[in-house]
Image (spheres, helix red, strand yellow):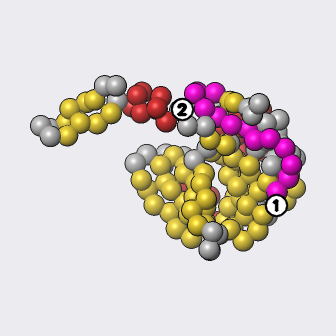
């Protein structure tokens, strides 16, 4: 592991080492969505976590440079779509910055359009954004969950730089 020396007393980890170590931790894949001015917005995220049970609070992160931040901050609502192992193509469509929002949503069938819920996932959580804060190169959003549903299947996972599956 390499460390960069900054000043005489501090050192920071090289970005590639940090990324490789964090890549050892398997995460589930989600697509976080919202609707603003009648238009759906969404992105692929593995930076999602449950924060609190009482009240039910989750967090997700979005790159600060993403134009999608404006939609989330204006709408103040979200839906977390938890992807199944059969939705790798959906994950890729929503992860590509080359795809417009329109192109992304052409790839999926929706169960709900208030905050888009994608058909075929393992579940979804919907709620209201209660806070957000820029941290490093991302904005961390906190949301209060007000609704959700669970479906059967196995999750789409990401670890070691690629998609993984259970079993």
Which residue is tagged 1? 149
Residue 96 - label: none
Q: In which quadrant will I find the N terminus?
A: top left
Magenta stretch contains residue 154: yes
Image quarter of residue 167:
top right
Residue at disc 2, secondary structure: loop
Residue 46, compared with residue 124, is above or below; it is above
Residue drawn at point x = 42 percent, y = 53 percent: 135
Residue 10 to residue 147: above or below: above
Q: Which residue lies furthest to the left in this view?
A: 8
- The residue furthest bottom is 55
Task: Let me know if residue 130 appears in the view.
Answer: yes
- Between 47 and 39, which is closer to the camera in this rendering? 47
Quadrant of the rendered image containing residue 77? bottom right
Residue 36 seen in the figure: no
Q: Distance between the residues labelled 2 and 1?
A: 29 Å
N-term-proximal mark, 2 vs 1: 2
Q: Which one is in front, 84 or 137?
A: 84
The reply, left or right, for residue 79 in relation to residue 138 is right
Residue 60 on image: x %, y %? 58, 54
Q: Position of residue 36 (x, y in %)?
A: 69, 61
Residue 129 in percent (x, y) is at 60, 67
Q: What element carries label 1?
A: strand
Q: How crowded is mark 1: few (under 14 residues within 10 Å), some or many (20 or more)?
A: few
Give residue 113's quadrant in the image. bottom right
Residue labelled with disc 2 = 24
Q: Which residue is drawn at 56% across and 70% down?
A: 130
Q: At 31% from the left edge and 25% from the top edge, which residue is drawn?
A: 2
- Pick the front one: 54 or 38: 54
Tell me the magenta residue range.
149-162
Q: In this view, does 47 lie to the left or right of 138?
A: right
């Amino acid at each position: 592991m390499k460390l960069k020396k900054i000043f005489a007393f501090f050192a920071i980890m090289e970005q590639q080492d940090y990324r490789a170590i964090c890549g050892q931790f398997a995460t589930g894949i989600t697509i976080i969505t919202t609707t603003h001015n009648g238009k759906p917005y969404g992105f692929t995220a593995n930076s999602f976590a449950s924060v609190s049970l009482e009240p039910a609070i989750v967090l997700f992160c979005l790159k600060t440079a993403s134009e999608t931040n404006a939609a989330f901050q204006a709408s103040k609502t979200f839906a977390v779509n938890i992807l199944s192992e059969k939705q790798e193509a959906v994950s890729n469509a929503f992860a590509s910055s080359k795809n417009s929002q329109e192109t992304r949503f052409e790839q999926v069938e929706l169960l709900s359009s208030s905050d888009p819920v994608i058909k075929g996932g393992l579940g979804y959580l919907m709620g209201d954004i209660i806070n957000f804060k820029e941290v490093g190169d991302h904005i961390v959003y906190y949301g209060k969950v007000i609704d959700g549903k669970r479906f059967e299947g196995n999750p789409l996972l990401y670890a070691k730089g690629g998609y993984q599956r259970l079993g």
